[in-house]
Image: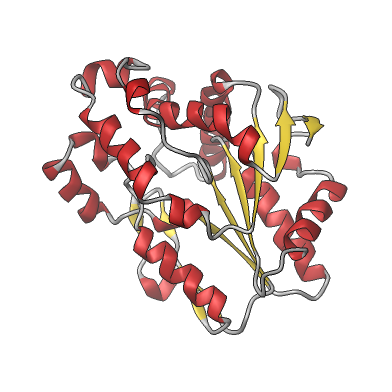
Amino acid sequence: MPPTKGFPDALVAQALDDALSCDTAIPVLAISGLQGSGKSTLAAQVVALAETRGLRAAMLSIDDVYLTRAQRQRLARQVHPLLLTRGPPGTHDLALAHATLDAVAAGGPVALPRFDKLADERLPEKDWTRIDGPLDLLVFEGWFLGTPAQGEAELEPPLNALEREADTDGRWRRWCNHALAHDYPALWQRCDRLWFLQPPDFSVVPRWRWQQEQNLQAAQPDRSSMSRAQLERFVQYYERVSRQALRTLPGLADRLIALDEQRRIIATR
């Protein structure tokens, strides 16, 4: 069951029912999963099912609240050059994320931010998704939702070539880990349910992400795309927190969906 073909109807219904069982006026269902695991596919299916039941639902990705390119350029100058690349903790506009969730919870009109990955820039507000009335459900998806920070000692040895070559003193990974420890927990606490799509291990992520890149290139032949070598380097930005998610989220998530290398469901808990 590759995520591109969708998750089973029964699983989608379980996710929706789980979210709606919360004692929250407008529940937030968080779907966490490493790159390529199918989290955006599952989120879209939950929203679609909710709509067939006459409910108003919408989805938001943590990728939609990246800092602007200018903000990341400032971080790259002031803190570390690696912070120009979006994705790791510390490269998100958490004030925007909280303001968006506040607006959803208030039940009034809300504009959901959107980010253009091809342009590496947040879309102007006029192009955000407009929700005119109160929602019944918000599905929030992201590659490290709910992940806690590492201990200081765990940051010492570099994990990969990126850390060995471009973060020799560990300043970048320590800064990201500090953000994960101090800035993100308040966002995680706003999620009423946490579902985790668990791959067998991190080694499948580069292959899954490469499949995504090829699919995007086939769908949009004019878009610029990464080579395999560039992609292998790119996923190293995410490796440390991804491995932390694999270690910790099985014990923290409300529901775990274990996937095999072909992204077929092999177990649920």
Protein image colouring: secondary structure
Identify whether 196 is placed above or below 200.
Answer: below
Residue shown at 44% from the left, 22% from the top: 228
Residue at 52% x, 28% y is 210
Q: Residue 136, position in %: x, y?
A: 69, 74
Name the side, left or right, on which 141 lies relative to 125: right
Total labels: the figure holds 0
Query: Vertical placement of 148 versus 247: above or below?
Result: below
In the rendered view, tell whether residue 61 sits above or below residue 169.
below
The percent coordinates of residue 258 (x first, y second) are 72, 30
Q: Nearer the viewer, residue 212 or 252?
A: 252
Direction from residue 146 to residue 29 in the image, left or right:
right
Q: Nearer the viewer, residue 256 or 228?
A: 256
71 relative to 44 in the view: left or right: left
Residue 33 in the image, given as x and y percentages of width and height:
59, 39
Task: Answer whether residue 32 is visible to the viewer in this image.
Answer: yes
**Corner quadrant of residue 3:** top right
